[in-house]
Image: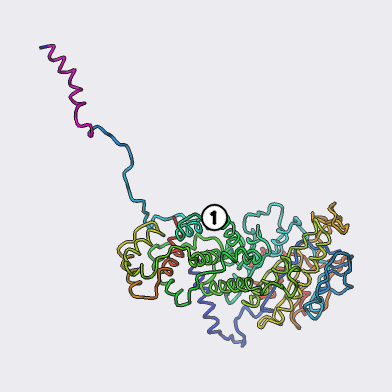
Amino acid sequence: MKKILIISFALLPLLFACGDPQENVYLYEVNTVDVEQSGVDKNNPKADLEFISLVYADLFGGTVSQSDIDVMIIAFTALGDKQLITDIIIRNMLNSPQANVPSDAQMRNDIEKFIEDTYLKFYIREPNAYEKWELQGMIEGDSELIPEMIYYAFLTSDEYRYF
Amino acid sequence: MKRRSFLKHTAALTAGTLSAPYVLPSGRLFAKTMNRKVNHVVFCLFAGGVRNIDAIHQDLGNLMPSMLTGVKSTADGITTLPTSPHPTILEQEGTLFPEFRYKDGPTGHYNGHTVALTGVYTDTGLNLRANPEFPTIFEYYLKHNSPSVTSKNAWWVSNALGPYPALNYSRYPGYGAMYGANHIAPTYLLNPAIADMLGQPKPFQFHEEEKVAKVRNFLNKNFGKDALLDNVGIVNTEDDARQIRAFIQDMYTKGQSGLLNNPLGLPSNQGNNDIYNILFAEEIIKEFQPELLVVNMTDVDACHQNFTNYMVNLQKADYAVAHLWNLIQSTPGMADDTVLIMVPEHGRNLDSNTVRDNFGRFGVDHTGDPTSREIFSLILGPQGVINKNLKVGTANNPVGETIDLVPTVANLLGFDLDIPTGLLNGRVLNEIYV
């Protein structure tokens, strides 16, 4: 009897060890979460050249070259009204054939998607229901309101100046 | 007050004032402008370090024949420029202080500019990375002038970057960017490399801009923070910004179409940085008729390494200011209602350095000896306001110093009495007045 008990205790760990191996796999990692930031949490203004680099990235999908940055540094320093020189730079980027701006037909084909994409692109967040409803109303109510104008409005808006 | 609110308020005030001027019991408009002597001042920093021996005393002949009487220099190596663009010698149209003084502080270019624009001498602790410590003439003007005007009326046209752009406003409490001038360094902003990048903006029509503004206002309202509060620098009203943007675009177009190839009527190979800076200052005058414009020249500083080039550039600076005065006198709204002030920021040493140029002439530095504090000032203005053909002061009895120019500009534009006491140590140069 004593021998049976000793064997039973010896086999006990094996009994647990032989369970479903999936139950013993422990993964220590961060849960997948959305990295969107609501507008109210954006408190850090972008530095001027940081801002321009981001405009470039958002419109052209790449990194601005050092030579272009050098030119923009000169332009920034050479005009006192920084908002005005920023505006001039944005207008020039918007006018480039390489700028990734949807066509008016693409926008009007699916306005809701256009609005969501635009908020994500420039504000790194989804629009709330009110923003979606209001902007959709503006687009539907004005056939002359084209994507370039909406992009221009986003790029020159206060929220875009902040992280 | 939030800056955006301030701008809206200022714009509304200005618009209201323009559309509905009131008449005082005395029969005059606008109470505080009663003391104005003129409605426009152009202040030209004839800078780079000009030695009085070479300018006023004409030791090498008259290198400034457009400004001063005297036998034109025929020194070897100097360029023959066209005759003066103005029909009379400038000295005859104003008051000359031949022995003006830059009395105190380091004789550095930026120090000299700062003193001229703030009316306060600097010391060796001048911070090159910050706006000036004391208010600039632009801030006095935009804060104290009545009726209120916008920054479109005040311009700082610099021919260099580095610390110079920071001279459009100070960090003095109660003044600052809200009262700052529009700064532009046109020879940089409008150069071909930048024109290639910035010369093709998306052309939105006015009604399209209104649509953009509607969307932007909606976005801003939802965000709730005013980005302008964190934005350093001056901000123009929307209308002014639109006009300035169109002006810059026009300059790009003119440059690209070759219309600026003969600056001030000179062959293109004669155009130096000073000539182009004056050219763009003239374009600003034509477009905006500003009430206060400051422009500088500094190419004579070639003197450190090349004395002959110093003489050549002194001639060009002389030609440029004559062209500027001539342009002012042919600009509607500014002719006969403008005072032009010219002054070097400091002089140069009596003794040469050891750098010899191709003509065997030695260079000259500016390290604070008594000669480097000797300068001149020439002040031109309308008949009946500014004394003509008058010289004030001699070597034995020097009259006037750099810190007197800010009070004098304030007096010319009629707001000197509104400047808080204790900020300025200079005096109004009353000798200029008839």
Using a 10 Å C-alpha cutoff, classify the residue at mark 1 as few (fewer than 14 neighbours), some (14 to 19) or many (20 or more).
few
Q: Is residue B289 left or right of residue B212?
A: right
Q: Is residue B217 left or right of residue B35?
A: left
Give yes or no for residue B234 being in the magenta stretch: no
Quadrant housing residue B364:
bottom right
Q: Position of residue B106 (x, y in %)?
A: 75, 55
Q: Position of residue B294 (x, y in %)?
A: 68, 69
Pinpoint the chain carrying mark 1. Answer: A
Q: Position of residue B205 (x, y in %)?
A: 48, 76
Amino acid type at circle 1 is Ser
Q: Is residue B2 visible?
A: no
Q: Is residue B261 visible?
A: yes
What residue do we see at 68% from left, 61% from top? B160
Quarter occupied by the C terminus of chain B: bottom right
Compared to B47, does A44 lie above or below?
A: above
Local SS, label 1: loop
For label 1, the residue is A65
Boundaries of the magenta span: A2-22
Q: Residue furthest left?
A: A1
Compared to B26, does A30 lie above or below?
A: above
Pick the front one: B224 or B301 = B301
Q: How many marks?
A: 1
Q: Is residue A141 left or right of residue A85?
A: left
Q: Position of residue B96 (x, y in %)?
A: 81, 73
Give yes or no for residue A14 being in the magenta stretch: yes
Q: Residue furthest front?
A: A97
Pick the front one: B229 or B331 = B331
